[in-house]
Image (cartoon, grey):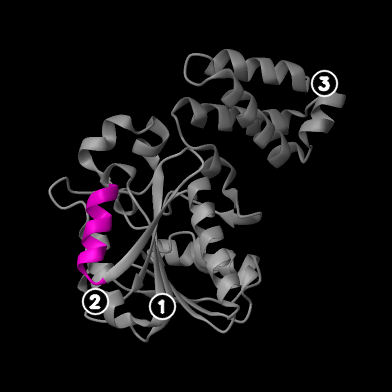
Amino acid sequence: MTTTQLKNQFLEDLGGKYPKEEILSFFNFLAEHILKRSRLQMALEPNKEISDAEISQFEVALARLKKFEPIQYIIGETEFFSLNFKVAPGVLIPRPETEELVQWILDEVSLQQNKNLQILDIGTGSGCIPISLKKHLPKAQISAIDISEEALKIAKINAEQNEVSIDFMRKDILSAEKLPLQFDIIVSNPPYVRELEKAEMQQNVLRYEPETALYVKDENPLLFYEKITKLAQEGLAKNGLLFFEINQYLVEETETMVKDHGFKTDLRKDMFGNFRMLKAQKH
Protein backbone atom coordinates (compact mmCIF):
# COMPACT_ATOMS: atom_id res chain seq x y z
CA MET A 1 0.00 0.00 0.00
CA THR A 2 1.23 3.51 -0.82
CA THR A 3 1.01 6.56 1.39
CA THR A 4 -1.64 8.07 -0.92
CA GLN A 5 -3.78 4.93 -0.75
CA LEU A 6 -3.52 4.89 3.03
CA LYS A 7 -4.42 8.59 3.22
CA ASN A 8 -7.48 7.98 1.05
CA GLN A 9 -8.51 5.13 3.35
CA PHE A 10 -8.37 7.53 6.31
CA LEU A 11 -10.47 10.09 4.44
CA GLU A 12 -13.05 7.46 3.53
CA ASP A 13 -13.28 5.72 6.92
CA LEU A 14 -13.36 8.92 9.01
CA GLY A 15 -15.32 11.06 6.56
CA GLY A 16 -18.59 11.04 8.48
CA LYS A 17 -16.95 11.68 11.85
CA TYR A 18 -14.47 14.53 11.32
CA PRO A 19 -13.95 17.44 8.87
CA LYS A 20 -11.58 16.68 5.98
CA GLU A 21 -8.86 19.06 7.19
CA GLU A 22 -8.83 17.42 10.61
CA ILE A 23 -8.54 13.93 9.07
CA LEU A 24 -5.57 15.07 6.98
CA SER A 25 -4.03 16.57 10.11
CA PHE A 26 -4.45 13.22 11.93
CA PHE A 27 -2.82 11.41 9.03
CA ASN A 28 0.13 13.80 8.97
CA PHE A 29 0.64 13.49 12.74
CA LEU A 30 0.65 9.70 12.44
CA ALA A 31 2.96 9.75 9.41
CA GLU A 32 5.47 11.80 11.37
CA HIS A 33 5.10 9.54 14.40
CA ILE A 34 5.06 6.12 12.68
CA LEU A 35 6.99 6.74 9.45
CA LYS A 36 9.25 9.52 10.80
CA ARG A 37 8.42 11.52 7.68
CA SER A 38 7.39 15.17 7.47
CA ARG A 39 4.39 16.52 5.59
CA LEU A 40 6.75 17.75 2.85
CA GLN A 41 8.39 14.33 2.48
CA MET A 42 4.94 12.74 2.22
CA ALA A 43 3.93 15.19 -0.50
CA LEU A 44 7.15 14.64 -2.48
CA GLU A 45 6.78 10.84 -2.42
CA PRO A 46 3.04 10.14 -2.64
CA ASN A 47 3.52 6.62 -4.00
CA LYS A 48 6.10 5.40 -1.50
CA GLU A 49 5.27 1.91 -0.25
CA ILE A 50 4.47 1.37 3.42
CA SER A 51 5.47 -1.85 5.20
CA ASP A 52 2.89 -4.25 6.65
CA ALA A 53 4.08 -3.45 10.18
CA GLU A 54 3.58 0.29 9.57
CA ILE A 55 0.15 -0.28 8.01
CA SER A 56 -0.82 -2.25 11.10
CA GLN A 57 0.11 0.71 13.34
CA PHE A 58 -1.98 3.06 11.18
CA GLU A 59 -4.94 0.67 11.34
CA VAL A 60 -4.79 0.54 15.14
CA ALA A 61 -4.74 4.34 15.24
CA LEU A 62 -7.62 4.49 12.74
CA ALA A 63 -9.76 2.22 14.93
CA ARG A 64 -9.08 4.45 17.94
CA LEU A 65 -9.91 7.61 15.97
CA LYS A 66 -13.23 6.05 14.97
CA LYS A 67 -14.04 5.93 18.69
CA PHE A 68 -13.12 9.64 18.97
CA GLU A 69 -9.99 9.05 21.03
CA PRO A 70 -7.80 12.19 20.90
CA ILE A 71 -4.88 11.94 18.48
CA GLN A 72 -2.56 13.17 21.27
CA TYR A 73 -3.38 10.12 23.42
CA ILE A 74 -2.93 7.80 20.43
CA ILE A 75 0.50 9.23 19.67
CA GLY A 76 1.26 9.66 23.38
CA GLU A 77 2.62 13.18 23.09
CA THR A 78 1.80 16.74 22.10
CA GLU A 79 3.54 20.07 21.58
CA PHE A 80 3.08 23.00 23.94
CA PHE A 81 5.04 26.26 23.88
CA SER A 82 7.43 24.65 21.33
CA LEU A 83 8.23 21.84 23.78
CA ASN A 84 7.31 18.17 23.63
CA PHE A 85 5.06 16.71 26.33
CA LYS A 86 4.04 13.16 27.08
CA VAL A 87 0.26 12.87 27.53
CA ALA A 88 -2.02 10.01 28.55
CA PRO A 89 -5.67 9.71 29.64
CA GLY A 90 -4.66 10.64 33.21
CA VAL A 91 -3.86 14.24 32.21
CA LEU A 92 -5.63 16.99 30.33
CA ILE A 93 -4.30 17.64 26.83
CA PRO A 94 -2.63 21.10 26.88
CA ARG A 95 -4.57 23.76 24.91
CA PRO A 96 -3.26 26.63 22.76
CA GLU A 97 -5.13 29.12 24.99
CA THR A 98 -2.98 28.02 27.93
CA GLU A 99 0.12 28.90 25.91
CA GLU A 100 -1.21 32.46 25.86
CA LEU A 101 -1.47 32.42 29.64
CA VAL A 102 2.17 31.29 29.91
CA GLN A 103 3.21 34.08 27.52
CA TRP A 104 1.34 36.67 29.60
CA ILE A 105 3.23 35.57 32.71
CA LEU A 106 6.56 35.77 30.86
CA ASP A 107 5.70 39.23 29.56
CA GLU A 108 4.90 40.44 33.10
CA VAL A 109 8.13 38.97 34.47
CA SER A 110 10.19 40.66 31.74
CA LEU A 111 8.65 43.98 32.75
CA GLN A 112 9.72 43.41 36.36
CA GLN A 113 13.18 42.23 35.25
CA ASN A 114 13.29 39.93 38.25
CA LYS A 115 14.27 36.38 37.41
CA ASN A 116 14.79 35.01 40.96
CA LEU A 117 11.12 34.29 41.45
CA GLN A 118 9.14 31.80 43.50
CA ILE A 119 6.34 30.45 41.27
CA LEU A 120 3.55 27.99 42.06
CA ASP A 121 1.32 26.17 39.56
CA ILE A 122 -1.87 24.69 41.08
CA GLY A 123 -3.42 21.72 39.26
CA THR A 124 -0.42 21.09 37.06
CA GLY A 125 -1.61 18.07 35.05
CA SER A 126 1.03 17.29 32.43
CA GLY A 127 3.28 19.99 33.91
CA CYS A 128 3.05 22.08 30.75
CA ILE A 129 2.77 25.45 32.56
CA PRO A 130 5.63 25.17 35.09
CA ILE A 131 7.96 23.38 32.65
CA SER A 132 7.41 26.04 29.96
CA LEU A 133 7.98 28.80 32.50
CA LYS A 134 11.15 27.17 33.84
CA LYS A 135 12.57 26.87 30.32
CA HIS A 136 12.33 30.66 29.98
CA LEU A 137 13.04 31.52 33.62
CA PRO A 138 15.88 29.17 34.56
CA LYS A 139 16.67 31.08 37.80
CA ALA A 140 13.09 30.84 39.09
CA GLN A 141 12.18 28.32 41.80
CA ILE A 142 9.04 26.66 40.50
CA SER A 143 6.67 24.36 42.41
CA ALA A 144 3.64 22.51 41.10
CA ILE A 145 0.69 20.87 42.86
CA ASP A 146 -1.78 18.24 41.72
CA ILE A 147 -4.18 15.88 43.48
CA SER A 148 -3.56 13.10 40.95
CA GLU A 149 -0.64 10.71 41.48
CA GLU A 150 -0.93 9.64 37.84
CA ALA A 151 -0.72 13.23 36.60
CA LEU A 152 2.34 13.92 38.77
CA LYS A 153 4.04 10.81 37.41
CA ILE A 154 3.58 12.11 33.85
CA ALA A 155 4.57 15.66 34.83
CA LYS A 156 7.83 14.40 36.36
CA ILE A 157 8.65 12.51 33.14
CA ASN A 158 7.96 15.69 31.15
CA ALA A 159 10.23 17.75 33.40
CA GLU A 160 13.01 15.21 32.97
CA GLN A 161 12.57 15.03 29.19
CA ASN A 162 12.63 18.82 28.94
CA GLU A 163 15.63 19.01 31.27
CA VAL A 164 14.17 21.24 33.96
CA SER A 165 13.83 20.92 37.71
CA ILE A 166 10.37 21.44 39.22
CA ASP A 167 9.32 20.76 42.83
CA PHE A 168 6.22 18.59 42.36
CA MET A 169 3.86 18.03 45.31
CA ARG A 170 0.76 15.88 45.70
CA LYS A 171 -1.90 17.94 47.43
CA ASP A 172 -5.66 18.44 47.42
CA ILE A 173 -5.81 22.20 47.15
CA LEU A 174 -9.42 22.28 48.38
CA SER A 175 -8.36 20.89 51.75
CA ALA A 176 -5.22 23.02 52.07
CA GLU A 177 -5.25 25.57 54.90
CA LYS A 178 -2.26 27.53 53.62
CA LEU A 179 0.45 27.39 50.97
CA PRO A 180 3.92 26.02 51.85
CA LEU A 181 5.60 29.43 51.42
CA GLN A 182 5.08 32.84 49.88
CA PHE A 183 5.21 33.05 46.11
CA ASP A 184 5.82 35.89 43.67
CA ILE A 185 3.49 34.29 41.13
CA ILE A 186 0.67 31.78 41.53
CA VAL A 187 -0.89 30.37 38.37
CA SER A 188 -3.75 27.94 37.93
CA ASN A 189 -5.84 26.43 35.15
CA PRO A 190 -8.31 24.66 37.46
CA PRO A 191 -11.45 22.67 36.56
CA TYR A 192 -14.08 25.14 35.35
CA VAL A 193 -16.43 23.46 32.86
CA ARG A 194 -19.94 23.25 34.32
CA GLU A 195 -22.05 20.12 33.87
CA LEU A 196 -24.52 22.19 31.83
CA GLU A 197 -21.75 22.99 29.32
CA LYS A 198 -21.05 19.34 28.54
CA ALA A 199 -23.44 19.50 25.58
CA GLU A 200 -20.94 21.83 23.86
CA MET A 201 -18.00 19.49 24.41
CA GLN A 202 -16.63 17.30 21.62
CA GLN A 203 -16.80 13.52 21.92
CA ASN A 204 -13.02 13.14 22.20
CA VAL A 205 -13.05 15.34 25.33
CA LEU A 206 -16.19 13.84 26.90
CA ARG A 207 -15.09 10.24 26.46
CA TYR A 208 -11.39 10.36 27.20
CA GLU A 209 -10.07 13.39 29.10
CA PRO A 210 -10.03 13.20 32.93
CA GLU A 211 -13.26 14.49 34.46
CA THR A 212 -11.57 15.70 37.64
CA ALA A 213 -9.39 18.07 35.60
CA LEU A 214 -12.34 19.51 33.67
CA TYR A 215 -15.68 19.63 35.42
CA VAL A 216 -17.28 21.40 38.35
CA LYS A 217 -20.83 21.28 39.70
CA ASP A 218 -23.28 23.79 38.23
CA GLU A 219 -24.20 25.12 41.68
CA ASN A 220 -20.59 25.97 42.66
CA PRO A 221 -18.57 26.59 39.49
CA LEU A 222 -16.02 28.92 41.13
CA LEU A 223 -15.11 26.43 43.85
CA PHE A 224 -11.43 26.18 42.88
CA TYR A 225 -11.02 29.86 42.01
CA GLU A 226 -12.38 30.99 45.37
CA LYS A 227 -10.18 28.57 47.33
CA ILE A 228 -7.02 29.51 45.42
CA THR A 229 -7.80 33.23 45.71
CA LYS A 230 -8.21 32.88 49.48
CA LEU A 231 -4.90 31.01 49.75
CA ALA A 232 -3.24 33.66 47.57
CA GLN A 233 -4.18 36.42 50.04
CA GLU A 234 -1.51 35.11 52.41
CA GLY A 235 0.43 32.99 49.94
CA LEU A 236 1.51 35.81 47.65
CA ALA A 237 4.52 37.97 48.44
CA LYS A 238 4.27 41.77 48.29
CA ASN A 239 3.27 42.84 44.75
CA GLY A 240 2.78 39.17 43.89
CA LEU A 241 0.58 38.17 40.95
CA LEU A 242 -2.17 35.60 40.59
CA PHE A 243 -2.97 34.25 37.11
CA PHE A 244 -6.01 32.17 36.17
CA GLU A 245 -7.31 30.58 33.02
CA ILE A 246 -11.05 31.17 33.32
CA ASN A 247 -14.42 30.05 31.98
CA GLN A 248 -15.47 32.48 29.24
CA TYR A 249 -19.11 32.20 30.41
CA LEU A 250 -18.26 33.17 34.01
CA VAL A 251 -15.97 36.13 33.42
CA GLU A 252 -17.91 38.71 35.46
CA GLU A 253 -18.57 36.32 38.34
CA THR A 254 -14.91 35.28 38.51
CA GLU A 255 -13.58 38.83 38.34
CA THR A 256 -16.06 40.08 40.97
CA MET A 257 -15.13 37.26 43.35
CA VAL A 258 -11.39 37.96 42.99
CA LYS A 259 -11.96 41.70 43.53
CA ASP A 260 -14.06 40.97 46.63
CA HIS A 261 -10.99 39.25 48.10
CA GLY A 262 -8.97 42.44 47.84
CA PHE A 263 -7.29 42.12 44.45
CA LYS A 264 -7.23 44.46 41.48
CA THR A 265 -7.77 42.57 38.25
CA ASP A 266 -6.99 42.62 34.55
CA LEU A 267 -8.71 40.45 31.93
CA ARG A 268 -7.32 39.28 28.62
CA LYS A 269 -8.92 37.67 25.57
CA ASP A 270 -7.57 34.55 23.89
CA MET A 271 -6.85 34.10 20.17
CA PHE A 272 -10.55 33.37 19.57
CA GLY A 273 -11.67 36.67 21.09
CA ASN A 274 -12.99 35.21 24.35
CA PHE A 275 -12.03 36.47 27.81
CA ARG A 276 -10.12 33.43 29.10
CA MET A 277 -7.37 34.86 31.31
CA LEU A 278 -7.29 36.89 34.48
CA LYS A 279 -4.39 38.56 36.28
CA ALA A 280 -4.82 39.72 39.87
CA GLN A 281 -2.65 41.70 42.27
CA LYS A 282 -3.21 42.59 45.90
CA HIS A 283 -3.99 46.26 46.52
Mark count? 3
Residue 148, percent from left and from top? 35, 64
Q: Amino acid at mark 3?
A: Pro
- Label 1 crowd bin: few (<14), some (14–19), many (20+), radius 10 Å: many
Residue at point 69% right, 32% down?
Answer: 28
Residue name at image x 70 percent, y 20 percent = 6
Please give the name of the residue rendered at 21% of the width and 80% of the height, measured from the top-left corner.
177
| Residue stretch in magenta | 251-262
Kindly identify the amino acid type of the residue bearing the numbered disc 1: Gly
Q: Which mark is residue 240?
A: 1
Which residue is identified by label 3?
46
Disc 1 or 3, which lies upstream in sequence?
A: 3
Number of residues whose C-alpha sits closer than 10 Å to that of mark 2, classed few (under 14), some (14–19) or many (20 or more): few
Say which of marks 1 and 2 sits in front: 1
Residue at numbered disc 2 = 176
Which quadrant would the C terminus be assigned to in this image? Answer: bottom left
Q: Is residue 79 left or right of residue 73?
A: right
Q: Quadrant of residue 257?
A: bottom left
